[in-house]
Amino acid sequence: MGVKIREIIPESAVQKITLESLSGKPVALDAFNILYQFITIIRGPDGRPLMDRRGRITSHLSGLFFRTINLLKVGIKPIFVYDGRPPELKKGTVEEREVRRAEAAKLYQQALAEGRLEEAQKYAKQAATLNEFIIESSKKLLGLMGLPVIQAPSEGEAQAAYLASRGDAYASGSQDFDSLLFGSPRLVRNLSIVGRRKLPGRKEYVEVEPEIIYLDKLLEELGITREQLIDIAILIGTDYCEGVRGIGPKTALKLIKAHGSAEKALKVIGKSIDADPREIRQLFLKPDVSENYSIEWREVDYEGVKRMLCDEHDFSEERVDKALNELKDALEKARGTTSLDQWLS
């Protein structure tokens, strides 16, 4: 879910951008975050995800293929970073999410059986989860597309932020704000969901545009340190703790600015949380990341991509051919070659 600090992020720290403005820049993407977007959004009117003839979910492959090609066509250099084993403090959050998804799955089947399709779709999205097939098939597709995949030892967002902080990526890309707490100098949001989107539970639509949030501007404008930004998150709740009931981002900001740290703020208000703030703080400041990774863009295996999507998973040959031809044209126009490595160098 990520920490909910959007309402205290100053507009001066946020820049609306176009995809083209990121041309030539490597962006470390939180793969799990993106896959969840696709399996949640890409569904039929009754809430069912896309599937092949063998009943295997393909919503994620559709989103990954077509949206990634859109990024490549404008010259963005995507690096996909996958989650590893979550920290022990996240165990409770993971278990709670599994319970909520199981309950949503039951409500989905009930709503579907009773013909309540709008409710069914809502519950289907809430029940969306990643399994081994979704993860491994997405890695296979990205490999065929010649794109770098990095397996994080723990949190994917932490590893992506590490790449950005080292300069191996221009920014990290995720819908969650945790990347900022992990120290990413820039966070790019909305890369994979650009366009017109329906507001949850309402019959209204909004235009979703990509944006960059700059960590240094955020901290300067709020007058706090990164450690204090983490402490704000601790008070309102993270994946590692529940936070204090009734305290939102604005109140947490006031408390941290007044008292300096989560420990002092908690003492003053006479509250406690379900974990040691020092341990949570360290998970963000010194997360488990790998220094041994390889970032390499290779030539697209056009035939391999087509075999996987069309032969194995029943994608429309016409649509896949059209997308691959557009990618070929973009590569040739950009560098006069179909070598993805040369095009993105």
Image (tube, rainbow, N blue to C red):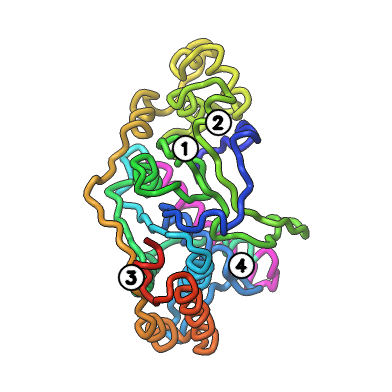
Badge 1 density bin: few <14, some 14–19, many ≥20, Cα 10 Å: many
Q: Earlier in the sequence, mark 2 or mark 4?
A: 4
Q: Earlier in the sequence, mark 2 or mark 1?
A: 1
Q: Earlier in the sequence, mark 2 or mark 3?
A: 3
Residue drawn at x 63%, y 26% as measured from the top left:
250
For the residue pair 292 and 103, the one nearer the viewer reads as 292
Task: Measure how far apart labels 2 and 1 are at the Cα level.
Answer: 9 Å
Write down the residue under mark 1: 180
Task: Measure how far apart labels 2 and 4 are at the Cα level.
Answer: 45 Å
Q: Answer yes or no: do the residues labelled 2 and 1 have beta carbons within 8 Å?
A: yes
Write down the residue under mark 2: 218
Mark 4 or mark 3: which is in front?
3
Q: Is residue 116 magenta?
A: yes
Residue drawn at x 46%, y 17% as measured from the top left:
261
Task: Measure how far apart labels 4 and 3 are at the Cα level.
Answer: 39 Å
Q: Earlier in the sequence, mark 1 or mark 4?
A: 4
For the residue pair 20 and 104, the one nearer the viewer reads as 20
Q: Earlier in the sequence, mark 4 or mark 3?
A: 4
Picture coordinates of residue 84, whole percent (x, y): 31, 52
Query: Does 95 sit above or below residue 57?
Result: above
Task: Measure how far apart labels 1 and 4 are at the Cα level.
Answer: 40 Å
Task: Indicate the amino acid at tag 3.
Answer: Gly
Write down the residue under mark 3: 143
Q: Earlier in the sequence, mark 3 or mark 1?
A: 3
Task: Indicate the amino acid at tag 2.
Answer: Leu
Residue 274: which quarter of the image? Answer: top left
Task: Indicate the amino acid at tag 4.
Answer: Gln
